[in-house]
Amino acid sequence: MNSNMPKDSGFDKTLRVLKEGYEFVMNRDKEMHTNIFETRILGEKTICLTGSELAELFYDNTRFSRSDAAPVRVQKTLFGEGGVQGLDGDEHKNRKSMFMSLMDNKAMDEIEDLTQKYWHEYFEEIDWNDTVELYEAAKVVFLKVACDWVGVSLQDEDNEARASQIADLYESPASLGIQHWKGRKSRSETEDWIKGLIEGVRNGELEADKDRALYHFAMHKDLNGELLDSQIATVELLNLIRPINAISVWVAMIGLAIHEHPNSAEKLKSANGQQLEWFIQEVRRYYPFFPFAVARVKLDFEWQGYEFKEGTLTLLDLYGTNRHPDDWVDPDEFKPERFEGWQETPFNFIPQGGGSYDFGHRCAGEFITIVMMRTTLDFLVNHLEFEVPEQNFGFEFNDIPAVPNDKVKIKPTRIK
């Protein structure tokens, strides 16, 4: 590695990553006054990158590969093995097209309607003497939205148990001990559930709506014109359901933002969709969601005097890029109005990854995220009256995903 590349002093920093979480890369960027440095994580040399310029480099598919980049513990919990996140080239384009074919305006309108429907139903069915944890409520609501949209029936399911099981997939990758193994167990159980549905569609035992993802994924063909392996189709269908459920993390942060920035929230009363979207985009920029994207150097190359060697693990700091002073004015302030007239690129605002949607590795579900967050925000500020009891709104930067400690408790009083 070129001696000019700043180096993080000391030995393996895996434990520091676990201790510092979202702030690991940012802390070293500030200490070394750099957007690029070398360290050691999980026993191997690792390059860490921050900012839109380096995000553009990171998402250059001629220079970086996703194959074999994600740690095994992440594949065993969050992504599943063999999913689209770890593919490159034509195979990635084929698999990504399966997702992007679902993301049209009609689908977004339907997801908006489903989100409204299930939030109203949830609060119509609760005991109004109860205090609701917004994060936990969102898990159940969004499981219903996800399964309804992809064509998976929840008729015989314990929705709270299944929602908790899906949540284990994104709550456990950075955990140690029991919590991590709980995530692995939930991954196995959810895959068994979905695989049974995929195989049921294929053998004709289960009738599936041909316009839904369940049918599309079950019948999707790979580059050789053959049906995807049923296990791979299972992983990919969960790669729709699991991220939709994970938007519940953002719902907790919406609740936190309403509490921490009441003046901005007050402006949303009877606001238009654009103002609601500015607010949720600022939530996505300001609060942590997913810390890093990972890749490996595809071939030896030099960039601005720095040498990148084939196979080197590389991390892009998503949270740090969304707060980078070269890309954002007053990055540590919560200012939804910054999005008025703002010029977005595929690399300067990357809470769910960057690059292009169709041919790159940007999250196919980002459109869904925005629709569901905007609809949820509108419901909370314009359709639900609630009180906010005393609680702990703090969260830890080494909790991934970061969620306020008391999961944002509210005491609903009336649906409007």
Image (spheres, rainbow, N blue to C red):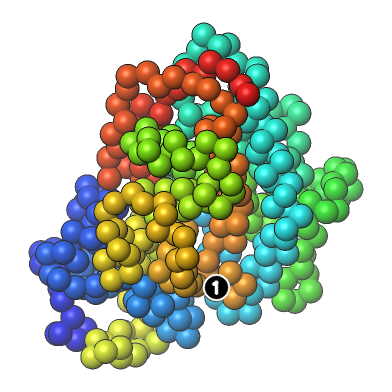
The x and y percentages for residue 121 are 67, 25
Front-most of residues 352 and 48: 352
Instruction: Check the image and report above or below for 158 versus 246.
Output: above
The x and y percentages for residue 120 are 65, 27
Picture quadrant where residue 9 is located: bottom left
Task: Give the residue displayed 24% in from the left and 86% down from the top.
Answer: 306
Q: Seen in the image, is 220 located left or right of residue 293?
A: right
Count of numbered badges drawn on the protein: 1
Residue 68 showing in the rendered view: no
Residue of label 1: 356
Circle 1: element type = loop
The x and y percentages for residue 184 are 48, 43
Front-most of residues 404 and 310: 404
Residue 125 showing in the rendered view: yes
Task: Give the residue displayed 47% in from the left and 69% down from the top.
Answer: 344
Q: Outermost residue, top direction?
A: 129
Under mark 1, the amino acid is Ser
Instruction: Check the image and report above or below for 396 versus 336.
Output: above
